[in-house]
Amino acid sequence: MPEYPLVLTKFLLRARDFFPGKEIVSYGDEVVRYTYADYAQRVHRLAGALTELGVGRGDRVATFAWNHHRHLELYFAVPAVGAVLHTLNIRLSQDDIGYILDHAGDRVVFVDESLLPQIRPVLDARPAIKVVVMRDRPGDGPDGYPGYEELLARARPVTEFPPTAEEELAVLCYTSGTTGRPKGVPYTHRTLFLHTFAACLADGHAISERDTVLHVVPMFHANAWGVPFAATMVGAKQVLPGARPTPERIAELIEREGVTYTGMVPTVAADLLRHVKETGRRVSTLRALVLGGSPPSPALVRELEQVLKVPVYQGWGMTELSPMASYGRITAGEDDGAADITQGRLLPGLEWKLLDDADRELPWDGTSRGELVIRGPWAATRYYRDESPESFWNGWLRTGDIATIDPAGRLRIVDRKKDLIKSGGEWISPADLEAALLEHPEVGEAAVVGVQHPRWQERPVALVVPREGHRVDEEALRRSLADRFARWWQPDRILVVDELPRTGVGKIDKRALRRRYARILLDERPG
């Protein structure tokens, strides 16, 4: 059988040939509407521009950008010329951004004009990196940086993309670095091709040509969960919200563009829910709302379904998994409530196991807790320029997540291995305490971290953010926890705070919390 390379350009050409009139809509200073036929022409021209910039096979081309049509063009043009798309996370510190640019060896960076001040000091220290500014106004960028549109206007389009092997790198994403320096995760064309097929299955995102997809998840984070590739492959209408999409903007675009599918982290979903309740705005065109990034509370899932009148699904994954691995769709004859508390079943093509501390396999009984390990065609087997053998085991990826799997094959993430609290030689699960705190009607967000204790080595401290318009009664919280957990599990302190720190990908930054409250119990008398 002749070889047929699984490369990303197949998705672009399919959209152009089968759905040339379908729309891509991009919101910014102006609204840009164009078709897949137009989009493909611009990608061919951008490929020519990249070649004229000196970008060659294997070179890394970075983006520092929000969700817009130019970013989407780079998603396909960079891999199409044999180079590697590197999506820089705009929420990282300048120190981390500088480290990542050096580690990746980026040759060119495409930057949103609005984000240029944020990255400018880093780029000034690296004059060898070429910079292209993406802006809605005509003309080149500040200080002589070439403008994206001017670059395209001067370029000769590539008529045919150069041959690319499916095992060549296509995309490079870095982890958020919550336990050290960010690590690069390389994705090949084959990796992303197969991940896209799995994501589009009926028991996955189930995106089709009939959908209108709103990209809320940042395109600088884990390929926006792979949805831009999926939407292009099937020829769906795509809506890009531009910079800093607010709940108001998200709801407005759902209504205006007839959005049927979108995904977001639970925090953004909670903000959207609050906006819809306050304004009565209709989002009735939605057929699916997917939550990921962190497990939502069952109460949030139920309220979203009741108020928005849309099925809510949970997905789970990580940067090392391209990123989707499981999806929480309800199967025939299954209680709807099962999706409230699980992250669903494994996507076809992957395998998983639970391992105890001695790397012995644990049963799928819904109660045995162990580290989740995964392998498959889109699971990482290495980091970019980083061996990190502790992250891999006999060909399996160690996820670092503590989980259970029930007899029906449903995953429930119960903790991060590094977040477990060891107090007096016994383990305490922060995630269990957080879930209980989030069930209280006054609590909007919760985090539990282990901090040093003069006698017990570590003890839990809870931090809670009240729901809007509510006040937290600490004694009521303690009573609710006392009904469910042993006394030694109870947090030594419950602190009410206005907000919780976030990582570059929007997750609660527990490392920052552990640093901030490291000494809060050290002055207490042992007891």
Image (cartoon, rainbow, N blue to C red):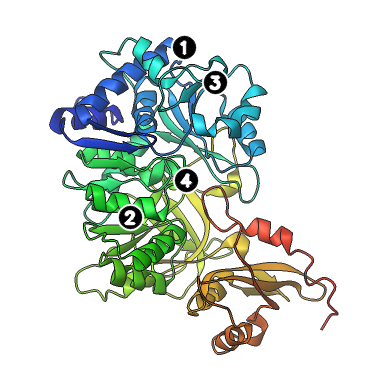
Labelled disc at residue 142: 3
Alpha-carbon distance for marks 3 and 4? 36 Å
Disc with the residue nearer the chain's start (2 vs 3): 3
Alpha-carbon distance for marks 2 and 3? 34 Å
Name the amino acid, label 3: Pro
The residue that label 1 is drawn on is 54
Q: Determine which quarter of the picture holds residue 268.
A: bottom left
Name the amino acid, label 2: Ala
Question: Mark 1 touching mark 3, by CB under 8 A?
Answer: no
Alpha-carbon distance for marks 2 and 4? 31 Å
Disc with the residue nearer the chain's start (2 vs 4): 2
The residue that label 4 is drawn on is 320
Question: Mark 4 touching mark 1, by CB under 8 A?
Answer: no
For label 1, the SS is loop
The residue that label 2 is drawn on is 251
Name the amino acid, label 4: Glu
Q: Residue at x 35, y 45 (%)?
A: 215
Q: Quadrant of the C terminus?
A: bottom right
Question: Mark 1 touching mark 2, by CB under 8 A?
Answer: no
For label 3, the SS is helix
Q: Judge whether 296 appears above or below 390 on screen.
A: below
